């Protein structure tokens, strides 16, 4: 049984057990405390601990009433640090139709309501009220994606940088190990916390050098200015050696320092090899944290993604360059998982943001350092990309050779437009748990181009290959495609064509979602502005709840209760020809 002292302390009692009168840094998180490398606050806490600092965590503090959770550990020697958790709190709380969700996967027993809306702002404002002279550092996905002025779907307006609204002193964006240690070192030596790479802060006077963006006020007034800002921000976020960004806001200046160079294998190994307990804090004994259960027996092999999907925040947060762990580090973690008392021999995932990008990078790294392309795969695969799967296949086979492992699955998404035949056969025959998830997202060439996704023909070829490999090996596995409705440029007619196309392929869709605009993505910028920031050409957008529902219903053409509404909608748009194709007799593959 794990001891309290095996975890970072969360209460005054736990500080007393360690004999600590004071801590250097107190971390506040909107998530429950799970001491595992998949949970950002645990990673930051363990990283700071490894650097020699005394760290405590306050998970899911009560922000009502007397605010005792914010006061119980007192004043830290260096600073407070805040994250809303592993998700933006508004995405965590609301559906694409702005309906309140009923559960929270990052809370004990999935209980809803243990974190506030705009969690980072609420925590920061409380700490600034209680301890006005103690620096507050904010980070995590919510702060990272809101580091500059951004469109907020839930208020349907442009909001200023979260630094302005939260009152925090410094914002760490992206993967925070390096900047957090640098900030702690500076604070320990009484040095300014501004100017650290991969951080943002507010200046009263304009910095001398950097790219000047349109001001917050200009973006509120002019959607074209907001779109122009986005392109610059995305290009600089993807750059190996980006430039400082400066955004005027309310007579001040939000300054974003460049991202650190990609982590080396040695650096990322050090982060994953820290002494995590790999389980929730003992305070949750007898309770289930759903997000932990999902990844309990999984291993993450790399960070970053060079796919550049328009609706995804991975590259903006983790970076475009893929940073991969060593085989030795991965195998060490697999063996740790295998020693867990309830492990039955099955790894749920050997993956990453895109499972099959492990170990991939530019053959000529100097070209990568000059590149501004948001995607290495679209509109075509970069000729400089090393597409060698040998290291990844070697890891799969080495993991499966371990005596404790009965089978390892690939639960992360796979890019089927980035796949060798050998790799595809290995995955289909040895690493699918009955269903393989892939994400074509749409069928329309126009919509897919704006999504930065490959032609649907790639998916059809992969579906044929999947069926062929299954037949050859006597397998009865399913291919599960993901699709999105109401993405910018998508019309009702496009959704009807999508439904017809998937019907021809004998798919009855389950894994679908309505597009949700989240801060700092290309798709969200198109949704808000009605413009493609790279061409400044107009883009159609389905905005109203009714428009979205009209598109979404086409996913479920096979349900009798939807068919009358679908027929009426096709007649409304003067496409009676599509009624027979979609609702008529089934057409086999």
Image: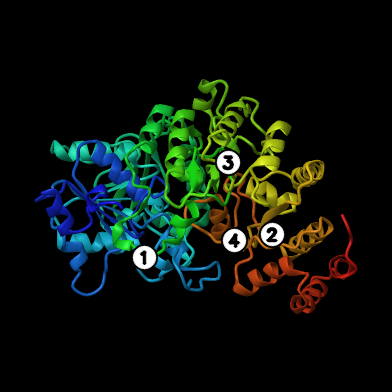
* Number of marks in the rendered image: 4
Q: Which residue is mark 4?
A: 515
Q: Residue furthest front?
A: 403
Q: Which labelled disc corresponds to residue 549?
A: none
In the figure, 187 relative to 85: above or below?
above
Asked whether the viewer can see residue 298, the reply is: yes
Helix, strand or loop at mark 1: loop
Dividing the image into 4 quarters, which one contains the C terminus? bottom right
Which circle's residue, 2 or 3, is located before the other in the chain? 3
Q: Nearer the viewer, mark 2 or mark 4?
A: 4
Rate crowding at label 1 as few (under 14), some (14 to 19) or many (20 or more) other CA atoms within 10 Å. few
Q: Which residue is mark 3?
A: 355
Rate crowding at label 2 as few (under 14), some (14 to 19) or many (20 or more) other CA atoms within 10 Å. many
77 lies left or right of 379: left
Q: Label 2 vs label 4: CA separation?
A: 10 Å
Helix, strand or loop at mark 4: loop
Q: Do tag 2 and tag 4 residues touch (Cβ < 8 Å)?
A: yes
Which circle's residue, 2 or 1, is located before the other in the chain? 1
Which circle's residue, 1 or 4, is located before the other in the chain? 1
Q: Which residue is mark 2?
A: 490
């Amino acid at each position: 049984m794990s001891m309290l002292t095996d975890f970072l302390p969360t209460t005054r009692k736990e500080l007393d057990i360690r004999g600590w009168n004071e801590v250097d840094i107190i971390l506040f998180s909107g998530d429950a405390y799970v001491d595992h490398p998949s949970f950002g606050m645990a990673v930051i806490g363990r990283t700071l601990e490894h650097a020699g600092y005394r760290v405590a965590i306050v998970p899911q503090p009560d922000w009502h009433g007397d605010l005792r959770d914010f006061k119980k550990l007192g004043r830290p020697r260096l600073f407070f640090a805040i994250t809303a958790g592993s998700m933006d709190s508004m995405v965590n709380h609301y559906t694409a139709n702005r309906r309140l969700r009923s559960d929270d996967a990052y809370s004990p027993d999935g209980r809803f309501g243990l974190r506030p809306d705009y969690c980072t702002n609420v925590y920061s404002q409380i700490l600034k009220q209680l301890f006005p002279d103690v620096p507050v550092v904010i980070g995590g996905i919510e702060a990272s994606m809101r580091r500059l002025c951004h469109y907020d779907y839930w208020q349907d307006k442009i909001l200023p940088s979260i630094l302005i609204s939260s009152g925090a002193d410094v914002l760490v964006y992206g993967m925070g190990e390096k900047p957090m240690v640098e900030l702690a070192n500076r604070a320990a030596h009484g040095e300014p916390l501004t100017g650290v790479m991969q951080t943002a802060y507010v200046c009263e006077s304009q910095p001398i050098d950097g790219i000047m963006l349109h001001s917050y006020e200009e973006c509120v007034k002019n959607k074209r200015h907001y779109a122009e800002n986005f392109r610059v921000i995305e290009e600089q976020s993807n750059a190996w050696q980006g430039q400082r960004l400066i955004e005027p806001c309310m007579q001040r200046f939000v300054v974003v320092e460049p991202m650190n160079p990609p982590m080396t294998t040695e650096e990322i190994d050090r982060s994953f090899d820290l002494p995590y307990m790999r389980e929730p804090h003992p305070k949750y004994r007898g309770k289930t944290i759903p997000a932990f259960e999902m990844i309990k027996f999984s291993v993450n092999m790399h960070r970053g993604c060079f796919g550049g999907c328009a609706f995804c925040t991975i590259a903006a947060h983790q970076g475009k360059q893929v940073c991969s762990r060593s085989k030795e580090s991965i195998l060490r973690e697999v063996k740790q998982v295998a020693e867990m008392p309830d492990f039955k021999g099955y790894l749920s995932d050997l993956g990453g943001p895109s499972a099959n990008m492990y170990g991939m990078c530019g053959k000529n790294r100097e070209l990568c350092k000059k590149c501004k392309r948001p995607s290495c795969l679209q509109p075509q695969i970069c000729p400089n990309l090393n597409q060698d799967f040998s290291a990844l296949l070697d890891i799969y086979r080495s993991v499966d050779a371990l005596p404790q492992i009965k089978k390892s699955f690939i639960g992360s998404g796979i890019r089927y437009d980035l796949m060798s035949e050998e790799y595809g056969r290995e995955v289909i025959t040895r690493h699918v748990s009955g269903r393989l998830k892939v994400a074509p997202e749409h069928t329309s060439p126009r919509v897919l181009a704006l999504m930065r996704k490959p032609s649907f023909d790639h998916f059809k070829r992969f579906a044929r290959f999947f069926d062929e490999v299954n037949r050859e090996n006597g397998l009865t596995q399913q291919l599960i495609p993901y699709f999105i409705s109401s993405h910018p440029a998508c019309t009702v007619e496009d959704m009807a064509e999508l439904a017809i196309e998937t019907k021809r392929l004998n798919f009855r869709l389950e894994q679908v979602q309505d597009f949700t605009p989240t801060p700092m993505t290309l798709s969200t910028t198109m949704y808000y502005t009605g413009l493609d920031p790279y061409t400044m050409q107009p883009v159609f957008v389905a905005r109203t709840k009714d428009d979205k529902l009209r598109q979404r219903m086409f996913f479920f053409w096979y349900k009798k209760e939807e068919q009358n509404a679908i027929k009426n909608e096709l007649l409304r748009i003067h496409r009676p020809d599509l009624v027979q194709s979609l609702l008529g007799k089934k057409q086999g593959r």
